[in-house]
Image (spheres, rainbow, N blue to C red):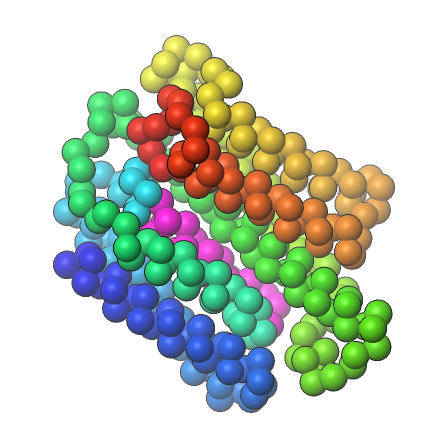
Amino acid sequence: MDVILFKITVLFYFLGTIGYLAYVMVPKKPVSRLSYLLLLSGFLLHTASFVVRYIMAGYTPITSLYESLFFFSWTIIGLFFLILLRYQLPILGSFVSPLVLIMVIITLVLPKDIAPLPPILRSFWLPIHALFSFLGYGAFALAFAAGVMYLIQEYQIKRKKMGSFYRRLPSLEVLDNLNYRCLTLAFPMLTVGIITGSIWAEYAWGSYWSWDPKETWSLITWLLYAALIHQRLVVGWRGKRAAIMAIIGFLSVLFSFLGVNLLLSGLHSYVAW
């Protein structure tokens, strides 16, 4: 049942993405409104699918690659809707929805079996650690989208290409502010995720930190974003450099999330995040 709901979810995300891409060409309110409703419907179905899988599994289903990508894409869309409440930037959906669509399509082709939970994962720390980690990842994804939009808008301004696409994107100031807000939301979440993971590791393996590949790359990602926030607050970094760093940081997130599990092995081989 959860897989059927997720397949319908992917359909709604596909239609919503088509709508938001059409909004780039035809920036009319009915187009953005319809796209918003399609994505929202997909998000509600996504949520229902997660609840059904939780009931079927008997534990928080975020351990396999299927479940991890499933939950990652859910957090991105959920945070996207929260950002829209604050910024009212429908064009953001034209950059976020394709990213989520790619993720859910990949998710759809992965093995979907519900496996028994390994003893090491039978802990109340599992949902706590995962929730904060994925909320951080999701907010970093939105900062990534804002960074890409910033670079596109800046390129148009420097090249004096003040065409229709220029008018559809927000000002550089708004995009820089959005980038910063997403970072200030994501960084504490990632920090708490790392701290709760360390506490859990001490209970499970008797050590708060073991330099496992996943732990190491999580630390690298944390340091990248810590440096970015420091440069913004202390040095006054704004604009292009901050946008580029937000993009680089998210690439580190993706490697920490996917690359480490696919290319390296370690204590975190039990889970896919």
Q: Residue at x 55, y 62 (%)?
A: 83
Looking at the rendered image, the quarter that the C terminus falls into is top left
Residue located at (36% from left, 58% from top):
104
Residue 192 visible, this angle: no
User: Percent position (x, y) of residue 1?
Assistant: 14, 59
Between 132 and 255, the one nearer to me in the picture:
255
Where residue 106 sits in the image (x, y, percent)? 35, 55
Residue 88 sits above or below residue 124 on the image:
below
Q: 231 or 214: which is nearer to us?
A: 214
Q: Quadrant of residue 164?
A: bottom right
Q: Residue sitting at 51 percent across and 40 percent down?
A: 255
For this orientation, the residue located farthest to the front is: 263
* Residue nearest the viewer, comparing 150 with 111: 111
Number of dots carrying numbers? 0
For the magenta stretch, what is the residue range?
68-89
Q: Is residue 144 above or below residue 156?
A: above
Residue 84 covered by magenta stretch: yes
| Magenta stretch: helix, strand or loop mostly | helix
Q: Is residue 81 magenta?
A: yes
Residue closest to the eye, 193 or 144: 144
Task: Report whether residue 252 is seen.
Answer: yes
Q: Quadrant of residue 158?
A: bottom right
Left or right: 251, with 197 as reference point: right
Q: Quadrant of residue 19?
A: bottom left
Q: Residue at x 47, y 46 (%)?
A: 135
Image position, residue 244 (x, y; %): 71, 51
**Extreme residue in the top direction:** 206
Q: Residue 92: x, y in percent? A: 57, 69
